[in-house]
Image (tube, grey):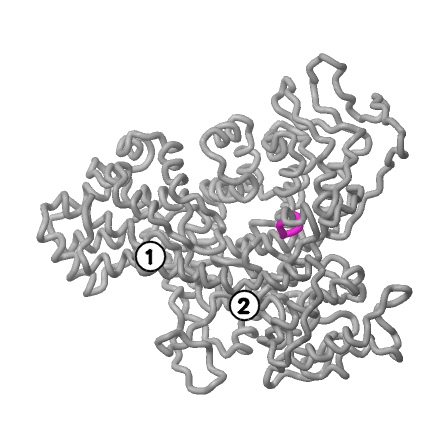
Amino acid sequence: MPYLVPELKSRWMACFSPDRLRCWLVGFAVAMSCSGPGSVAAVAAGVPAPAPDAAVSADRFWTDHIAPLLEEHCADCHSATRSKGGLDLSSLHTILRGGERGAAVVPGKPLDSNLYKFLLAEADPHMPPGKRKPLSAEEADLIRLWINKIPVVSGASSSASSAPSEVGSVSGSVRRPAIAWRPPAAMDPAQAVDRFLKLAWEQHRIKPAKPASDATFLRRLFLDLVGRIPTHEEAATLLDNRSSDRRSQWIQQLLKHPEHPRHLREVFDVVLMDRRGAKAEDSREKHLWFQFLESSFRENRRWDEVVRQLIVARPGDAEDRGSEWFLYERRNNAQAMAEAIAPVVYGVQIKCAQCHDHMVAREIKQAHYWGTVAAFLRSKNVETPEGPAVAESAIGGFVSFANLKKESQQALLTFFNQRQVDEVRPKEGEKEVDTPELYRVPPAAEKTKPVVASIPKFSRREAFARAVTEDNPLLARAMVNRIWALLFGRGIVHPVDLMDSKHPPTHPELLDWLSEDFARHGYDVRRLIDLLCRTKAYQLDSRAEVVKPSKPSAPRTDKAGAGLPEADAFARFQPKPLIAEQLIRSLLAAQGPSGEEGQKLVGLTSTQLRRSFVKEFPDVFAAEYQPSLQQAMFLSNSPIMENLLKPVPGSLSERLAREPDVDRRIQQAFQAVFLRDPDPEESRAALEFLRSRSIEAGVQQLLWSMFTSAEFQLNH
């Protein structure tokens, strides 16, 4: 395989440099050493908290003293899932956002803070209410000390109704005042999103990047909506459109593109089912899972209805066959079913609560984990004449779980979104009897094959589906955050499946409004994608607008001293790595030819070719971009890459080799691969490179250096 000319290597292969790999390893080690497990372990073990140190930061004070205190005394009524009076005390962000009485805390002013005032003996109302154990004077004083430690944002109102709320911090750092603005009913939703972001930028004194060029935006849009870059012909045709609303037209065209539902299916197959190898993929194809998922996006079915079908697993007609594979592939493992569905319906991972209440996100209880598991405990895979199905029993499935103190509890149908389903439970010592009267569709007689899957009159799966798809705002929030991350490179909550109290949203008011809008408009995924793509924020350049800091309040700076917006500000487009499917299809779109001729290049079917890239590039929605040495070796040494560059008839390599003018050859290569002309430095380096080699070898090596570059392998 060819080596890169030094100039091209320095510009295009930066993402695979040894220095960068070393930086990631060092950064990981530093992050692990600073994670502070000691305080969490001490709380778990019941070790008394040390006396507070006046020099301890508000963040540390919160973690060590305040969060455990509020969890013990207040979480029953004021948590992320049960916020009486609209008040959630699980994080500083929600505390400052407040409830019906306004903010619970005014930074630096405990006597103006309801959280502290209502703890005083003479307070009316007095908290905690009723016969609940009151806080001691020492515990109340800890809260007073903590409120005094919370930094006050300059220029923010000190009134409880407009107290600042923090963005991006897990505990005690206050970064900006809350945004009280609400969009007018008639406002375009894309404009509303931009307004929320603009208000946040103004508070941070962040200057957003300039708009991306048409070519950059078109490439970005193709990758996000179709799953590949445009071909040279597609780009030329669309960029020839000079109408003022051409970008909106492109969005609508690509949302109707036949490859759009396939791309969403490939993404959400990984989200819902994980990558489990060729054998699992073959089973999903055979048993119509891919067909169900792709048709759901093609027909733009309501997301809440799609989720309901995944849980209930009883397809009503032929086109829905395949929906049952979501549960069937878990092979009667109720815990695997519960852990897979939780990020979809709650937006959180619950598997850490299997043995005890979550040690970091304290609102996730062990009872929620086992309650969700119980919803699937009566499920059983069966084979019917129409294919695999998931039957459900009318009896059984009653289990208990023990916490770390070995205290046993019954697993009730209690869920993370504070919904609970009542069911008749057998009395102690009573033996349940399974009779046909308990079923809408009875199970097959013993030793006979079922014609259809059994359906009980009381179905736990149906009850759970109602609890999480009806009047459950977490379902909309989880999907909005997921689609935002798909388009913007990271979620409003990051990582996308950790929407808990320890990972507050960077733009809480925006997430609240978008989630309400998504639910109000029928869980319409296509509409959500359309409005986000039409925002000015999505259409920004990925290069930051550099501003020299002139005062202490200027934006945070990098080592060079230039202002640089944070990744979670969305003040510039966040570059994101192509997933395997995007990468191979973009290679074929640029190099060509496609179809059977393209497959002859490498001697593999399209499925085999895609899987070879999936093996090396498995990540989708990775929390952090971590290119590996194996990926670099695959791109450098794989026969697949070498064969893809062969100058067969109709390919880019063949067309470039036939071009007699070297300058034209370079320009055509850049237009096909990057959708832009080379700059003078690139032209000079490429010209020198090509003149030192034979035409055919030079073309293949030039294209290889471009295809393996950061510019090609990132969506920017």
Q: Label 2: few (<14), some or many (≥20) within 10 Å?
A: some
Residue 423, picture quadrant: top right
* Residue at 84% across, 71% down: 127
* Residue at 72% across, 34% down: 377
Residue 243, picture quadrant: bottom left
Residue toward you, 517 or 46 = 46
Q: Quadrant of the N terminus?
A: top left
Q: Say if the magenta span includes residue 346.
A: yes
Number of marks: 2
Tell me the distance, in whole angstroms, between the alpha carbons under discs 1 and 2.
Answer: 31 Å
Q: Nearer the viewer, mark 1 or mark 2?
A: 1
Q: Is the magenta stretch mostly helix, strand or loop?
A: loop
Residue toward you, 48 or 27 = 48
Where residue 297 appears, as percent x and y from the top left, is: 55, 42
Q: Say if the magenta span includes residue 419.
A: no
Marks 1 and 2, the one that precedes in the sequence: 1
Tag shown at residue 194: 2
Is residue 665 at all visible to an observer of this figure? yes
Element at badge 1? helix
* Residue at 14% across, 43% down: 696
Q: Name the residue under label 1.
A: 15
Residue 386, picture quadrant: top right
Region of the chain picked out in magenta, as a range: 345-349
Q: In which quarter of the image is the C terminus?
A: bottom left
Tag shown at residue 367: none
Where residue 102 appears, as percent x and y from the top left, is: 75, 75
Would you say 47 lies left or right of 261 here?
Answer: right
* Residue at 32% across, 53% down: 712
